[in-house]
Image: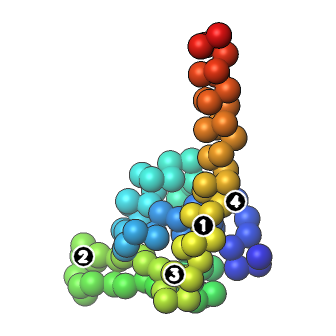
Amino acid sequence: MDLVGGKWKAAILYHLKDGAKRYSELRKEIPSVTEMILSLQLKQLEKDGLVSRKVQGKKTPIKVEYSLTDYGSTLVPVLEAITQWGNQPILDKREFLKEINNK
């Protein structure tokens, strides 16, 4: 849990599960995270071997992409299960509301 615990790591990993993303793309997909926190969390995930950072080009603008490592990819089923579990109360409530409206 030390590797993926906290408020943002699982969200970052979830957004990287479908492929590499640039920092700006992650910022758009997770708008409530601050730039500093996103940067720190990406560095920590890279240090822990879950995310890789690929730098392309030597002159500005340098393109940097983040992606899951093979080790990080092993978390995808867990992330999807957590997402499904977290969405279930919303889906259940919607079904409950449909039943009330039909009566």
Q: Nearer the viewer, mark 1 or mark 4?
A: 1
Mark 2: give few (<14), some (14-19) or many (20+) Cα within 10 Å. few
Q: Which of marks 2 and 3 is in front?
A: 3
Q: Earlier in the sequence, mark 3 or mark 4?
A: 4
The CA distance from mark 2 to mark 4 is 32 Å
Q: Name the residue under label 4.
A: 7
Location of the N terminus by quadrant is: bottom right
Q: Which amino acid does label 1 sit on?
A: Leu
Q: Which of marks 2 and 4 is in front?
A: 4
The CA distance from mark 2 to mark 3 is 30 Å
Q: What element carries label 2?
A: loop
Q: What residue type is labelled 2?
A: Thr
Q: What element carries label 4?
A: loop
Q: Percent position (x, y) of residue 4?
A: 68, 73
Q: Residue at x 24, y 76 (%)?
A: 60
Q: What residue type is labelled 4?
A: Lys
Q: Is mark 3 on a helix, strand or loop?
A: helix
The CA distance from mark 3 to mark 4 is 19 Å
Q: Name the residue under label 3.
A: 73
